[in-house]
Amino acid sequence: MRILVLGGDGYLGWPTALHLSRRGHDVGVVDNFARRGYDLEMGVDSLVPITQLQQRVKRWEDVSGLRVEPYVGDLCDAAFVYRLVAEFRPEAIVHFAEQRSAPYSMIDRHHAVYTQTNNVVGNLNLLYAIAEIDPSIHLVKLGTMGEYGTPNIDIEEGFIEITHRGRTDVLPYPKQPGSFYHLSKVHDSANIMFACRIWGLRSTDLNQGIVYGQETDETVLHPELATRFDYDGVFGTVLNRFCVQAVVGHPLTVYGKGGQTRGMLDIRDTLACVELAITNPAEEGEYRVFNQFTESFSVAELAEMVAAAFPGRVTVANIDDNPRVEKEEHYYRAAHTKLLDLGLVPHLLSGSTISSLLAVADRHRDRVDPAAIEATVQWRKTASSLATAGLVAESR
Ligand code: NAD
Ligand code: USQ
């Protein structure tokens, strides 16, 4: 199958592209290197060194004899998107290419606007290009479990049957996202669902949980095939961060009470889920949602698991002043059967998974910048932070 991987230079996009290439697909990799730019902006870097896209592509060809075709461009540039789709003629497009950090989107007005513009406009350009060039293309879009938030009822897979005043309908599950980034995914979902309804497009929205891990069958074949690994306070996700913190002797940064519970999955399962979605495409006009995670854990449980797997001493720092505004203790039960029904065999989180993550962190411990670990972005706004961001002036 001909498959475009948008965001193919990123943490998940690059290993997905290699996996699909090895599985015999013709793969194009698209990126504008925005992610590398955020590193420069924040003064941080991937823990594991990553090579430039052209070099990665060349190395993959040397190692595997297979070629993935690189395309450099911005999804917010409609002309680029149209050209890309018209030239490559994909049968499926996997769309990872968004600003994906909740803290980054909460830095200030500028970063919130950037995140929503980049994500929503890029996705909208893509929907138009698909509709006008080839509506049979299957769009596999990365969404997030965070679209649902943490309601006090079970979370369903995209839709919920509601009976209201004697009438019943199946409706999109209510969304209560926790950051302007997560909100951008909600807006994308609404736009995709609408495009499927009015233009007959086919799409799978993968509401993915938090991904952990860094190594896949393909990326371990050569150091220049490695994917990025973020541990900093803005882009690092919780379990990856805890493993790096344990290795460098930093107390594990559990925000608030630590009862925040999230769906999680191994990076190797991201690849498998995307492949399952592609090889079992949505029908014409169908908008479907898969909840893409395999297990859920609270932040405190994750800290305990890392402490148990680490051979040395680990301390846990409960950071009372949670930088985020979120429920710290809550009910959480989310359905996730659709990918299992398609044949997903999950890699569940075990002590040995954590040990292998700790080993990755240990190999690169010299590259850890302790200052980068601190959480610097606050969800709450004070009068002075609003003034600094220019919001007070703007609102006059
Ligand atoms: P990432 O930032 O490492 O990769 C995203 C890539 O998209 C980057 O290389 C970036 O340069 C590119 N990109 C961003 N905007 C672009 C644009 N306008 N045009 C072209 N390229 C652009 O992120 P990731 O962790 O690989 O996540 C990939 C996707 O999966 C995101 O959409 C994210 O929301 C979603 N997701 C990630 C996780 C996770 O734990 N990492 C969990 C759930 C969902
Ligand atoms: N947390 C800590 N300590 C830390 C880091 C995080 O306690 O050092 C807590 C956060 O407060 C939050 C939870 O851990 O309650 C998860 O935070 P995270 O940064 O690991 O994940 P999140 O911000 O939700 O975002 C990540 C990805 C995003 C994806 C999302 C999936 O960056 O792209 O959409 O996971 S989900 O969480 O299902 O929405």
Image (tube, rainbow, N blue to C red):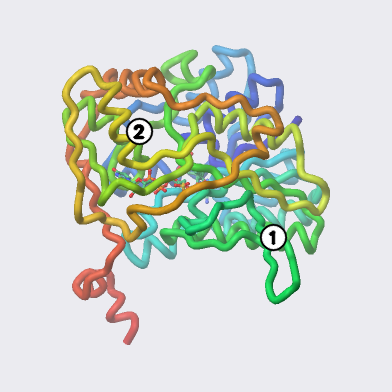
Instruction: Give residue 270's quadrant in the image.
Output: top right
Residue bearing the label numbered 2: 240
Q: Which residue is drawn at 59% across and 45% down?
A: 335
In front: 391, or 272? 272
Q: In this view, does 13 lie to the left or right of 78?
A: left
Q: In this view, does 334 lie above or below 179?
A: above
Instruction: Residue 247 in the image: state x and y as whole percent.
Output: 23, 25
Q: Nearer the viewer, residue 235 or 55?
A: 235
- Depth order, front residue of 383/82: 383
Residue type at numbered disc 2? Asn
Query: How many numbered discs sit on the rendered protein?
Result: 2
Residue sitting at x 18%, y 41%: 317
- As drawn, 26 above or below 234: above
Pointer 1 residue: 161
Query: Gap in Å between the C-alphas at discs 1 and 2?
Result: 36 Å
Q: Which mark sits nearer the N-terminus, 1 or 2?
A: 1
Q: Which amino acid does label 1 sit on?
A: Glu
Q: Can residue 125 be seen in this view?
A: yes
Q: Residue at x 64, y 26 (%)?
A: 20
Task: Kindly indicate the quadrant of the structure image that contains residue 185.
Answer: bottom right
Q: Is mark 2 within 8 Å of ligand 2?
A: yes
